[in-house]
Structures are given as C-alpha cells and as structure tokens.
Image (cartoon, rainbow, N blue to C red):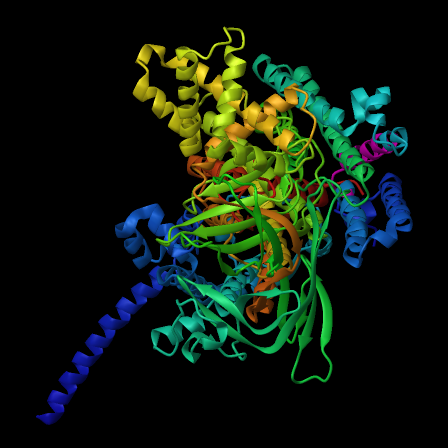
C-alpha cells in the first residue's frame, strides 16, 4: 500500500541523523582512539571506560542538541592550538602572545568571566529595551563565554601535567575549578532551554546566578591565589571523580537555573515585567524540566558519591556533613516533585519552593565547606 | 436465653471490630497518604540538619566543655551526639519505610491495572467531555480510515485495541508510555530496599543486645585482651565498621568500634600484621600517597596473604574490606639533649625515650615527668609572613607532655631544626596548658652555626651570678668611659643598680625588671627608665657574649646587625623562658622512625541491597520523568464519516498541549486530505 500520507510520521533517532552527525561522532571516536593509543599505559580499565563512555555520551549529546557539535569542535580546536603553542613548556604562558592574552588557562578563564558579565548586560538591555538584537548579542556572548571557559579547563588540564606528570589531573578537584564548571553547566543548560523554547528573556535572570559565581571566582583568584594548580590529595586520586563531580554539577547547575526561572515566575505572577517575560506556563515548564533533569543527575551523583565513599572512606554512607546535605537537597527536590507530579500542584508555592531550594543547594555546595567540617574537605575556603 | 446473650455478644464484638477496623483504616489512610509522605521527607531533612551542625561522635569531654554539665546531660539524653544512630532518628526512618511501603501496597495494583488497560470501553459522551478533543470529517470509507489510523498510531509508538461499535463504526483505544507508571513503583521500591540495606549495616543488632542487657560498651582505658566478653563482638558479627592501629612490625586480631563515650572490641576471624607503612610526597611537600604493606594470617590457610593497601584501593578478604584510613607514630625512638633553660650552666643531659612512654626527669629536687606523645617526620607549614607563600616541609617535630608534682600537665611541641621566621632562624617550642588552646611559642634564636649552643651559653652567662661582678665592671666601664677616671659615688651607685638589674633579669626576665621600675620610678619617668634599663641589659648581654668568646679562646665577634638581632632575640627568649612552664628544654637530636597505620575494617552485607536499590531508583526516576504516558481514542463513526479524536495524559502540561496540537494537525492531513 502506498503511504505517501505518512510523510510527516516520526522517524527513529538513527534515521534522522545526517552525515554531519556521523562525521562528528567519527571525529570523537578518532579522538578517543588517539588518546587511547597515546596514553593507554597510564589508564586503568575504568578510565578507558570513561574515555570511550565520553565518546558515546558526547555523540548522543551532539545528536540530540545540534549546537553541541560545533561547541565541542571549537573547544577542541582552540585547546589543541593552545597545547601546540605551549610546546611542552610551562614558561610559554608568559612568552607566547596568544597564550598570555587569550588562551592560556588563566587568561581563557578571565575571558570567560568578562564575557559572562557582558552577556548579562546585553540580556538586560535587550530585556528592558525590548531589543531582540541585544538579546541575540547576549546569547552569542554566553556561547563565547562557554567556549572560553571550556578551553580554560582543557588547557588547565594540560598545564597541570606540565608542572609535573604526577601532579596532572582533571581540573574539577577544588572549589575554584568546580565553580568554573558550575558556570559552564548552568550556562549550557540555559542555552539549551533558550533554543528549545525560542525565548531569550530569561538570559538576564539566569546570568545573575552565573555572575554571582563569577564574582566568587574573581575574589577567589585575586584574594586567595586559588588559580594555582595544586596536586591531588590521595583521597581524590580516583576515576570516580571524573563522573561524580560532573554529575553533581549538572544537578547544582540546573537547580540554580530553576531557581532563577522561579524568580521570573514570581515576578510575572505579580504582574511585574509580565509583558516582557514568557507566559507563566512556559516559565513553569522550564522550571519543572530543569528540576527534573537536576534531580535525576543529582541522584546519580549521590549514588556515585556513595560508591566512591565505599572505596575511599570505608563505607557508602557515613553521615558526613556533605553527604547529609546532599541528602537534604535530594529530599527537598523529591518533595517538590511529589507535589508537582502526584498532587498536580502548580503556581507560586512551587516557585517559592524552587527559590528556597537554591539556598539549600548553595549551602550544600558552599556552606558545608565554609561552616562545617568533615571528610569532604577538599574545597575549604 | 443463653443464645440471645451470645447473639448480643457477637453483635457487640462486631461493633468493636468495626470501630477498630475503621481506626485502622484511618491510620492506613494517613500513613499511605501523600501528605504524610511529604511530611516525612521534610522531617527527615530537618532532623538530618542537626547532626551536621553539631559535630558528631566527639569525645564527651569536648561536649562538656562546649555546653556545660547541664546541657551536656540534656543533649546526651536526647541523643544529639550521635543523631543518626539515635532511637528517634531510627523511628523517622521506620516511618519513611512504612509510608513508602504502604504507598506501594496501595497504588501498585491500580498502576498495574492502568498499565495493562486500554480503556476500550470509553463512551462517546465521555470522550466528548475531554479537554483535548477534535472531530474530523473524512472522505474515506470506514475501512480506509481504520487502516490509516492503525498505521498512524503504530508509527507514533502507540499500542491499540479496536472495538467494533453498534453503529458499524469502530473505536481505536491507544496508549503509549505506559511504563511511566513503572517508574513510580521502581522509585518507591528502591527507597524501601535502600533503607533496609542501610538498616542492615547500622548497629541495630548491637542496639538490641544492649537493650536486652547482653552487651555493654567499655569505657575504661584497658588493654584489648582485658576487655570482657560483654563488650566484644564475635567474628561472626554480620555488619560492622571498626578501626585498628598497627605499629610497623606488629599485628592484631581485634579492632575497635567507638560508640558514644566508650568502645566495643570487634574480634576478627584472622589477624593482620603491618610490615611497613609509607608516605610519598609531591615535590611541593603535600602527601601523594599513603600505603601499608599488610599480611593477613588466617588460621584456615597455610601461608599468609600479603597485600598493599592504599587510599581508594582497599583489600577485601573474606567479605571484610580493609581500608587505609589513618596513620601516625608507632613508637619511634627519640634522642634528646636536655637543657636547663633557667640554669646558670650550659651543660646538657642526654635522654632517650620512645613515643607513647612516660619518663621521670626529676633530677633530684622537683618531681617531673615527660610523656612523649607523638613524633612527625614531615611538617608542611606556611611560614611566610603574609601567608601567601608556598607551604613547605620544615622537618620533624615531637609532641610531649610535662607533668609536675601536682599532676598538672603542659603540652609541648618542639621542632628539631630551626625554622625561618621573619628572615631569621629559630628553634621553636610551642606550649599550651589546655588541650583546646593554641600553642604559644618560645623562639630560641639559632647561633651563627645554626645551632642552639650559642644561645644556651649566652643564657648560662646571663643567669650566672658569679660572673656579675665582672659583667658590671665592663658595663660600667663602657657606660662611663667618657667621664672621669676616678671611681666616685656616681659610679658606685650606677654599678649597684646594674647589679640589681641583672639580678632582677635573672629572676624573672623583663617582667621582673618592669616590676622593679614600677616599684622604684615615678610614673612619668618610667618610659625613659625602661629605655635606659633595656639598654643596660643589652650591653650586659653583649659583654656576656664577649666574655664567653674570650673564655673559649675565640677572637672578639664583629658587632654587626646579625649579632645585634641575635642578642635581642636571645634576651626575649630568656625572658619568655620564665613563662615556659617547665625548667627544661628538650632538644630533639636524633630519631629512629617507627610508623603506625590506621586501618578501617568493614563488613557491610547491606551494600548489595543499597546498590541494587540505587539502580532501581535511577531507572525509576528516568522512567517517571522521561516516559510520558498518553492515551488516544479515535472513534470512527460511519454516519457522516466522522472521526472523533480525544487525547489524555497522566500529566497535563505544556508538552502535552503541544503534542495534542501536533497530533490534531497530522490527523487532519491524514483524514481530511482530498488529493491522492
């Protein structure tokens, strides 16, 4: 039977992939194989698993969200250029012009900071002047900031090996590094929803929380010289870090995003700036989606953390302050999701809850390190 | 008659039963309700906060110091020092398990029914009452429409059932994403499984045994062998988390579990011996790895098992995981020179002892004992003045207590090598009278050879009264050289006061000198007098230094800035010695390092449950969030060739509205398209 009338029927993901998608995945795979052939002797089985797992995960991400492909290629390109310029010497940071002013890890991270601030200004200008152009500029600035941030982390990863081979490690091991990760993940999550919902009005709101983190990074850099790369303490020398920390920050990032959307919701609900903001339904929807992604990843991160703890500290759960606060954050959003999904609750109560949730999350992320002591003391201020 | 009474009784009984069952019913309703579940989540969250704010499982003396006796006892009574193992916390957890289990029990049958049902009995009237519905007019025959709809539904991942209607038409009852419901069941089952696993690994068995009086914690500080059986757990104990500290070359077959203000001994089915412990460092001095070479001697095996464990790489033997968790001194042998820091001689006494032992150092008159408590080979300190410099290793130090006749103890920490502070080298010795205080440091300047001898000789000379006449002569000669040669009254007076000053200094340093000034000089002249006195003492010290050199047959020292600073620092150190709390300075001169390794041993049978529960949890969460349950009904009516489309979802949200619109459009093209 002819089925011409079926032309707008859905097709499975694999059939929808174009040659760009496959080319992208092939590049990733080649990169993975290259890394494996170069460094296999320094990796244990788990790390090899993580390497090729990353190929799969980033392939999927690129297939599902096309801009990711370009982002990854640009970050890889610039990072490889930087590594080329280093030429195996730490001193290049100060000697090579391009490194010194643009793409050494410290410069790239500074550029990220600047771009995030500019992006926020552009978004707010666009928001109040109802200028789609300014908002578009804001969006491009966020993309550029994300590129610079990831380049900064990649190059930092390389730089750490330049200090000494045994010092080298993935740059997600202390408060300074994870704050950068937090900015990047929150920004990426926002960009995803910006694309999905074709709206840019929330950029200014989300960038408030990102720039708060940028402020912290700046203070931490100039007052505490936190940018210096420190070797890993024995407890952190584990492949678990590579999966536990990013999963956790997807949680933190999306919870922060949800809280800022909740703030916009509360304003719109009171009629403040309502004409400039997306509809309440859209705001509510973004908030819910961000929290559900965050909840899923936060759950995974906490479980991975427990598994790591079982290997490093002798028990999967020790009621350490960080663990306990992770549980509190989890319980908080579990209650939120119960109300929303089972009770079908909507409206300002949930928005307030999401906003207060940010305080709880911030305490778990930062407050525990500042005020409480325990096993999890890598990020002490 | 009897039967009537019996009937009445039965009636009463049934009444009682009825009211009882309705209370039970209400209780069941309450416990399995959403509101209760959310409340338990919130209460658990708040309860958890307490244990993070108050440091848990500290030694009880710390709590007494912190809260005072009254509050200490009250907080102990409500179990605040070990919140997560207290009775009331356990009850909250039990309620969580209960509420979740009842929730599963109550909703699972319903959900499974929903999961299977197509709801093919929907009536047109009810479909028309849907909020998401649309009616099409189609040019196609009932058969053609039916086959198009079947393909459409299949292509969109819907499973369906067709039911012929009385009017010759048919109803397509379709659904997709039914497994969303499975998400609910999985997540809630996961919570129960995880909690049960966690409870298995808690200390419930001991708690029960303690409550029944079979076991009790040991609070006395006695050797492991003397701990009575009621404070020991057998090797068969299903679940435990215990610690042991092994010095290098030693072994043990029992570990300790700290509970409240006491402990339990956990006997092991094998013994563990520590062959060696190693710390590796990065170039910057930070620790890079902690490793223990251990040997397991199992009575069931012929030869011992050897292994190296390190952080993140435990050894699992016979279901017991052995972790590297701590390290410390294992009784190093230490050599000292003992200096009498208030005495008038520079002689030393050799002294050798090992860490964790107690020694009598009375030396005749006052009873005094030294307890060596710790030795550290590496000490990474940041000594830069602004705190911004790089931390580095400053070498070994020793911690000890000096106890006097009254049993009063002071704690000291002495560094073996001089430390660079403000550009100068000092031998540092910290002192504190209370455990919770921070150390106050005595800074003894190193001499030009980087040794402590120079200071000790100067100190001896300054405190040696037999040298004072000559010292006074020299000072007076220097001070009054510009004046006349005759020894007049002024000079005699001056010399007498220098003598008095030196005596005061040797009795109590600058503090005593200040007292002397306060007693003798009117207030307005004190600042000036202090200046003058300081100058005199400094001059005397220079002369004492010179005398020492003369006696040793050395040429006079060049009077440069380094020497001036050395003299100045020495005078401060001498003055501070009076507040040092002990007349002795223990100079660490050599050591034979013996380390110990802290091992943690755990057996946690609940781990398997917790991990499988975690897998269920993740699967469940993804199913719940990312599988969207939707149902579609398409009622094909031969009369006027109409198709009624209705759609519903378990979650009414924006995605559903969008999907409905998309479906509506597609169906319109499918059913109303005339060209083909």
Query: Which residue does the image show at 54% across and 61% down from the upper left?
Result: B119
The answer to whether one can see residue A51 in this image is yes
Locate the C terminus of chain A and report the quarter of the image it occupies: top right
Magenta part mainly helix, strand or loop?
helix
Query: Which residue does the image show at 69% across and 72% down from the upper left?
Result: B295
Q: Position of residue B390 (x, y in %)?
A: 68, 33
Locate the N terminus of chain A and report the quarter of the image it occupies: bottom right
Q: Nearer the viewer, residue A263 or B80?
A: B80
Query: Does the segment drawn in magenta span residue A65?
Result: yes
Q: Is residue B492 left or right of residue B305?
A: left
Query: Which residue does the image show at 53% across and 55% down from the upper left?
Result: B372
Q: Position of residue A188 (x, y in %)?
A: 68, 34
State the extent of the magenta-drawn residues as a range: A63-81
The answer to which image quadrant residue B87 occupies is: bottom left
Question: With respect to residue B652, does B454 lie above or below?
Answer: above
Question: With respect to residue B16, does B110 lie above or below?
Answer: above
């Amino acid at each position: 039977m002819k089925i011409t009338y079926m032309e707008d029927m859905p097709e499975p993901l694999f059939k929808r992939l174009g040659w760009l998608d496959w080319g992208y995945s092939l590049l990733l795979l080649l990169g993975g194989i290259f890394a494996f052939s170069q460094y296999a002797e320094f990796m244990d089985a788990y790390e090899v698993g993580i390497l090729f797992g990353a190929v799969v995960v980033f392939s999927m991400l690129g297939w599902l969200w096309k801009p990711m492909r370009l982002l990854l290629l640009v970050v890889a390109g610039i990072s490889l250029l930087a590594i080329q310029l280093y030429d195996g010497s730490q001193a290049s940071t100060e000697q090579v012009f391009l490194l010194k002013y643009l793409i050494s890890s410290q410069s790239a991270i500074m550029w990220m900071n600047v771009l995030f601030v500019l992006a926020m200004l552009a978004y707010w200008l666009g928001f109040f002047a109802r200028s789609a152009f300014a908002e578009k500029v804001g969006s491009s600035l966020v993309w550029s900031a994300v590129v610079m941030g990831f380049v900064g982390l990649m190059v930092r990863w390389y730089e750490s090996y330049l200090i000494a081979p045994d010092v080298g490690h993935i740059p997600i091991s202390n408060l300074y590094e994870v704050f950068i990760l937090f900015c990047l993940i929150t920004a990426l999550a926002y960009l995803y929803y910006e694309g999905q919902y074709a709206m840019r009005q929330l950029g200014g709101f989300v960038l408030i929380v990102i720039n708060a983190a940028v402020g912290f990074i700046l203070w931490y850099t100039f007052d505490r010289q936190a940018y210096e790369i420190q070797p890993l303490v024995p407890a952190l020398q584990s492949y678990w870090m590579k999966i536990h920390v990013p999963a956790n920050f997807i949680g933190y990032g999306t919870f922060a995003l949800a809280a800022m959307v909740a703030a916009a919701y509360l304003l719109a609900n009171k009629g403040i700036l309502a004409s400039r903001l997306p509809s309440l339904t859209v705001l509510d929807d973004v908030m819910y989606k961000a929290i559900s992604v965050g909840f899923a990843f936060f759950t995974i991160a906490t479980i991975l953390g427990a598994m790591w703890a079982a290997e490093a500290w002798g028990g999967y759960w020790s009621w350490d302050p960080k663990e306990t606060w992770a549980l509190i954050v989890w319980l908080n959003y579990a209650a939120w999701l119960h109300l929303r999904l089972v009770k079908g609750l909507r409206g300002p109560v949930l928005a307030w809850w999401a906003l207060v949730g940010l305080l709880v999350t911030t305490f778990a992320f930062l407050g525990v390190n500042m005020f409480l002591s325990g096993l999890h003391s890598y990020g002490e201020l | 008659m009897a039967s009537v009474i019996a009937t009445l009784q039965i009636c009463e009984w049934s009444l009682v039963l009825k009211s009882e069952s309705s209370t039970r019913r209400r209780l069941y309703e309450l416990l399995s309700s959403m509101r209760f579940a959310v409340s338990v989540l919130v209460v658990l969250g708040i309860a958890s906060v307490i244990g993070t704010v108050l440091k848990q499982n500290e030694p009880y003396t710390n709590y007494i110091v912190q809260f005072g006796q009254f509050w200490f006892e009250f907080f102990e009574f409500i179990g605040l020092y070990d919140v997560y193992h207290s009775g009331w916390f356990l009850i909250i957890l039990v309620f969580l398990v209960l509420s979740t289990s009842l929730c599963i029990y109550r909703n699972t049958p319903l959900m499974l029914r929903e999961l299977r049902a197509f709801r093919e009995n929907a009536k047109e009237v009810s479909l028309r009452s849907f909020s998401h519905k649309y009616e099409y007019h189609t040019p196609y025959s009932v058969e053609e429409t039916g086959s198009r709809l079947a393909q459409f539904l299949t292509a969109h991942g819907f499973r369906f059932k067709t039911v012929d209607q009385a009017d010759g038409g048919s109803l397509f009852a379709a659904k997709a994403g039914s497994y969303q419901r499975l998400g609910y069941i999985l997540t809630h089952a996961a919570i129960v499984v995880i909690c049960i696993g966690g409870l298995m690994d808690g200390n419930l068995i001991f708690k029960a045994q303690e409550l029944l009086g079979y076991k009790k914690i040991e609070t006395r500080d006695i050797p492991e062998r003397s701990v009575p059986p009621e404070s020991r757990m057998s090797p068969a104990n299903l679940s435990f988390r215990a610690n042991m500290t092994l010095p290098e070359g030693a072994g043990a077959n029992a570990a300790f579990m700290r509970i409240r203000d006491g402990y339990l001994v956990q006997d092991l089915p094998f013994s563990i011996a520590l062959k060696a412990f190693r710390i590796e460092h990065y170039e910057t001095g930070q620790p890079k790895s902690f490793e223990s070479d251990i040997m397991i001697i199992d009575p069931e095996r012929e030869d011992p098992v050897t292994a190296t464990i390190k952080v993140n790489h435990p050894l699992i033997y016979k279901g017991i995981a052995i972790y590297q968790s701590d390290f410390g001194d294992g009784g190093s042998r230490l050599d000292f020179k003992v200096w009498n820091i208030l005495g008038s001689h520079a002689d030393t006494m050799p002294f050798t002892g090992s860490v964790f032992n107690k020694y009598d150092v009375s030396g005749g008159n006052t009873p005094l004992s030294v307890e060596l408590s710790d030795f550290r080979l590496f000490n990474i300190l940041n000594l830069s003045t602004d705190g911004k410099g790089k931390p580095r290793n400053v070498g070994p130090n020793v911690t000890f207590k000096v106890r006097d006749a009254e049993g009063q103890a002071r704690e000291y920490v002495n560094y073996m090598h001089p430390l660079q502070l403000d550009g100068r080298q000092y031998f540092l010795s910290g002192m504190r009278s209370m455990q919770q205080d921070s150390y106050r440091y005595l800074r003894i300047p190193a001499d030009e050879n980087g040794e402590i001898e120079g200071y000790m000789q100067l100190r001896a000379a300054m405190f040696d009264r037999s040298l004072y006449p000559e010292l006074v002569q020299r000072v007076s000669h220097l001070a009054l050289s510009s004046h006349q040669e005759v020894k007049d009254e002024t000079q005699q007076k001056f010399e007498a006061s220098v003598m008095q000053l030196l005596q005061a200094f040797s009795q109590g340093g600058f503090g005593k000198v200040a007292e002397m000034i306060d007693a003798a000089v009117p207030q307005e002249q004190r600042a000036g007098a202090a200046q003058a006195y300081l100058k005199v003492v400094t001059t005397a010290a220079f002369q004492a230094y010179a005398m020492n050199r003369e006696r040793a047959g050395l040429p006079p020292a060049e009077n440069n800035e380094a020497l001036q600073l050395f003299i100045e620092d020495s005078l401060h150190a001498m003055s501070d010695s009076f507040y040092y709390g002990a007349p002795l300075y223990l100079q660490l001169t050599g050591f034979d390092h013996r380390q110990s390794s802290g091992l943690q041993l755990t057996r946690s049978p609940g781990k398997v449950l917790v991990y499988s529960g975690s897998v269920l949890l993740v699967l469940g969460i993804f199913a719940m969030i990312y599988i969207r349950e939707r149902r579609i009904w398409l009622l094909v009516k031969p009369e006027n060739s109409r198709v009624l489309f209705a759609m519903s979802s378990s979650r009414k949200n924006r995605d559903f509205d969008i999907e409905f619109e998309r479906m509506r459009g597609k169906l319109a093209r499918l059913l109303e398209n005339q060209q083909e």
